[in-house]
Amino acid sequence: MDLDQLETLLAVAKERGFSRAAQRLHRTQPAISQSVRRLEEETGEQLFDRSSHDGVLTEAGRVLYDYAERLLNLRGEARDALIELRQMQRGRLMVAANEFTCLCLLPVLNVFRRLHPMVHVTVQRSLASRIPEDVLKHSVELGLVPYRPDHPQLRSTVVYRDELVFVVQPRHPLAAAKSVSIRQLGTVDFVAHNVPSAYRKKVLEAFQRHHTPLHMGVELPTLEAIKRFVAMGNGVALIPGLCVEHELARRELVAVPVRELRMERKLRIINRKGSGLSHAAQAFLKVVEQFAVQEKRYLFQHER
């Protein structure tokens, strides 16, 4: 049985006759009779009392009537839900990001929520190395990563440009320097992030290339902890610029250029290839694209 047949059943019962049901559904009476006959064949039950001419249901007909009404109501609810999704009156968006990349999302999320307050957004914290897998496994729809993932089933779009910043406490001996060389850093104590990353590897390689020791006296699990510890006068650090904007503005930390350590970081939004994006995800990417036009550090460049 299909929903059109059930709709016919309801119409005949409500209109108390086949001809009036035909008028209501804008169909011919023979078509209505045929639809009911097919439904009876499929159910193996007589649904209308043939001795009556006003669409009286049999006991089997009354049982099916209740189920038909529920199913058609569900169809209506499903249609309404899809309309609401298209109009952004409901929906859900799941995004994966790490501690650092999440900061890039906040201005975008601020605008998105003002435009679409009925969409529920969840930013799930994850290690950058695991985010491509989260996207591929459908755990999240979008991921934000600081590298280009090497997987043929992922599409990446560069959305933000940042760089590593060498920061010190304002009373540190290097705080007044206009710039320093990497060799000058061979005697200072670094507070490092203990989470493996491509940029940690690049920093280690840069010090090795310049034959300079890298002293990491303390390793901490979060960038927030590193910033606070350095601001207390404990060593120096290399931190993504996005993460220290407020501390630099308040002079809690000072940025000093290192000539040999100019490392640009590009953040990318990734999603599955061949998988249509939800209305919420499409709207979110449109907001990101608008930021690329209005804000200096934001981009919207498809890579593949």
Image: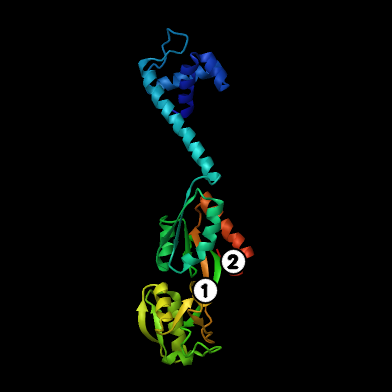
Q: Please state which of residues 90 and 266 is positioned toward the viewer in this rendering.
A: 90
- Label 2 is placed on what type of residue? Leu
Secondary structure state at the residue bearing disc 1:
helix
Q: Nearer the viewer, residue 64 or 83?
A: 83
Q: In which quadrant of the rendered image does the N terminus lie?
A: top left
Marks 2 and 1: CB-CB under 8 Å?
no
Q: Nearer the viewer, residue 56 or 165?
A: 165
Q: Is residue 78 above or below residue 69?
A: below
Tag on residue 256? Answer: none
From the image, which quarter does the C terminus lie in? Answer: bottom right
Crowding around mark 2 (Cα neighbors within 10 Å: few <14, some 14 to 19, many 20+) is many
Q: Is residue 47 left or right of residue 247?
A: left
What is the quadrant of residue 56 in the picture?
Answer: top left
Residue 295 percent location from the top left of the image: 61, 66
Residue hosting label 1: 245
The vertical placement of 249 against 11, above or below, is below
Q: Position of residue 88 (x, y in %)?
A: 54, 47
Q: Is residue 132 above or below residue 43?
A: below
* Residue drawn at point x = 41 percent, y = 84 percent: 233
State the SS at label 2: strand
Does residue 150 appear in the picture of this structure? no
Q: Disc 2 designates what residue?
A: 299
Chain-order first, disc 2 or disc 1 = 1
Color theme of the render: rainbow
* Residue 145 x/y as whole percent: 47, 67
